[in-house]
């Protein structure tokens, strides 16, 4: 009984984003809202139109303490529902309830499988198929109680706000989700969802990360293993993507013409890149030592491509040895290649071709990180 005549706040168990939560239900009260906003444990859910907190043992006692003398906390429904086992997992004190694993129904599984087969028939890349299927499954699990043909544009908006943005996931991840949903619903009939009205998040304009020539040189000099040195040198000297390097075959090296043939790269495109004489010498030394059979760079199993995680580890160790205090990735070497070409005066249209870009607009981003012209500009501070 509310003997203090305080506003009543009810605690109600619920499920939100596959987690057990406790909703805080009360009539609009500015004092309560102001206090809730200050509490890092509490969050607002648009889906439930309510403040909530993740369930944990004795959570009602904590809420009672947070709102002491501000609201009358009614947790009778919470206790009754708990007794009726609506909170389904038995846990020890101070252990958070583990998230439930939600399985797609057979109808949705079938639709996802059909979508995957459709992409295979259209010859989408393995990475694209994997990304789209995982993104679609995540979205359909979020609306596991709703049939596919009843999901609307409003549901996508809620998913973006209550899942992607609430979890502070990246804009690129949001774009992947949107791409998967748009493609899936484009080939799915009997849907209330209007594909053309699905919005995309505004793309962030992020400059590529670039190493100086001195940093690249110090990075390659610390490599003692000929295989590791050749692999990283090839990425930088030819501006290759990681997958392009790992898919190279010995026959792709045309030493007589002085080029490397990059086959079926991003966008299912072949291209050729120039092969420097220094790299050719390094490749010959490497080939004599390892004698690769199927792929140019093979792993421990003969004939199998080198593992991409191992290559990333090689780079990470080299960065540490070279004492470069930057979070360098393999793609930084490709960015550095393009920027250094631009700074050396290479026409941007040639760089576009070498990198395999479909449009010069993609390549033009390197003009923003090239310091060739910037160094000619004198700061007004110097003339003070």
Image (cartoon, rainbow, N blue to C red):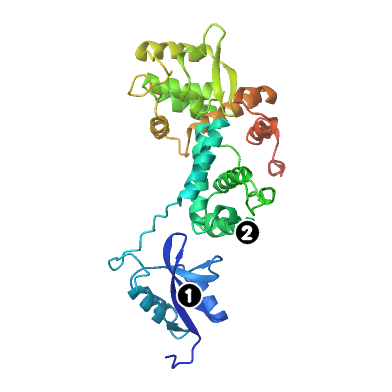
Query: Where is residue 181 drawn, in percent x and y?
Result: 58, 47
- Which residue is painted at 33% across and 75% down in the image? 83
- Which quadrant, please, contains the N terminus? bottom left
Residue that lies at the very extreme toward the top in this rendered image: 256
- Secondary-structure class at tag 2: helix
Residue that lies at the very extreme toward the left in this rendered image: 92
12 sits to left or right of 89: right
Residue 379 position (above or below residue 211): below
Residue 159 position (above or below residue 276): below
Residue that lies at the very extreme toward the bottom in this rendered image: 3
Report whether residue 151 is seen.
no
The image quarter containing residue 56 is bottom left
- Secondary-structure class at tag 1: strand
Density class for disc 1 (Cα within 10 Å; few <14, some 14-19, many ≥20) is: many
Residue 6 position (above or below residue 258): below
Verify CB contact (< 8 Å) between mark 1 and mark 2. Answer: no
Residue 166 position (above or below residue 230): below
Query: Where is residue 342 drawn, in percent x and y?
Result: 64, 26
Density class for disc 2 (Cα within 10 Å; few <14, some 14-19, many ≥20) is: few
Depth order, front residue of 142/31: 142
Query: Where is residue 91 drawn, in percent x and y?
Result: 29, 65
Gap between marks 1 and 2 measured at Cα:
25 Å
- Which quadrant, please, contains the C terminus? top right
Which mark is drawn over residue 24? 1
Query: Where is residue 287 drawn, in percent x and y?
Result: 40, 12
- Which residue is painted at 54% across and 54% down in the image? 164
Report whether residue 141 is seen.
yes
Depth order, front residue of 59/283: 59
Residue on which disc 2 sits: 154
The image quarter containing residue 69 is bottom left
């Amino acid at each position: 009984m509310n003997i203090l005549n305080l506003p009543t706040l009810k605690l109600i168990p619920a499920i939100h984003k596959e987690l057990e939560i406790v909703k805080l239900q009360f009539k609009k009260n500015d004092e309560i809202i102001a206090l809730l906003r200050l509490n890092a444990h509490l969050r607002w859910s648009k889906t439930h139109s309510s403040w909530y907190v993740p369930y944990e043992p004795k959570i009602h006692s904590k809420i009672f303490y947070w709102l002491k003398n501000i609201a009358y906390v009614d947790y009778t429904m919470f206790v009754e529902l708990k007794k009726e086992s609506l909170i389904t997992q038995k846990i020890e004190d101070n252990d958070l309830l583990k998230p439930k694993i939600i399985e797609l129904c057979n109808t949705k599984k079938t639709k996802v499988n059909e979508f995957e087969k459709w992409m295979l028939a259209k010859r989408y890349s393995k990475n694209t198929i994997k990304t789209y299927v995982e993104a679609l499954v995540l979205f359909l699990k979020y609306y596991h109680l709703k049939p596919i043909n009843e999901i609307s544009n409003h549901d996508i908006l809620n998913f973006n706000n209550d899942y992607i943005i609430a979890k502070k996931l990246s804009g690129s991840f949001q774009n992947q989700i949107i791409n998967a949903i748009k493609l899936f619903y484009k080939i799915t009939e009997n849907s209330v969802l209007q594909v053309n009205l699905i919005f995309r998040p505004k793309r962030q304009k992020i400059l590529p990360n670039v190493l100086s020539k001195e940093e690249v040189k110090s990075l390659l000099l610390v490599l003692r293993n000929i295989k590791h040195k050749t692999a990283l040198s090839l990425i930088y000297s030819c501006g290759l993507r990681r997958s392009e390097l790992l898919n190279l075959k010995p026959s792709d090296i045309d030493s007589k013409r002085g080029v490397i043939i990059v086959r079926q790269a991003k966008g299912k495109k072949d291209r050729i890149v120039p092969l420097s004489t220094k790299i050719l010498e390094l490749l010959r030394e490497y080939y004599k030592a390892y004698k690769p059979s199927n792929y140019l760079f093979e792993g421990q199993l003969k004939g199998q491509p080198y593992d991409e995680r191992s290559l990333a580890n090689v780079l990470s160790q080299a960065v540490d040895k070279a004492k470069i205090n930057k979070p360098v990735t393999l793609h930084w070497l490709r960015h550095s290649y393009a920027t250094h070409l631009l700074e050396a005066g290479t026409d941007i249209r040639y760089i576009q071709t070498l990198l395999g870009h479909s449009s010069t607009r993609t390549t033009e981003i390197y003009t923003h990180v090239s310091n060739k012209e910037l160094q000619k500009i004198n700061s007004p501070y110097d003339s003070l």
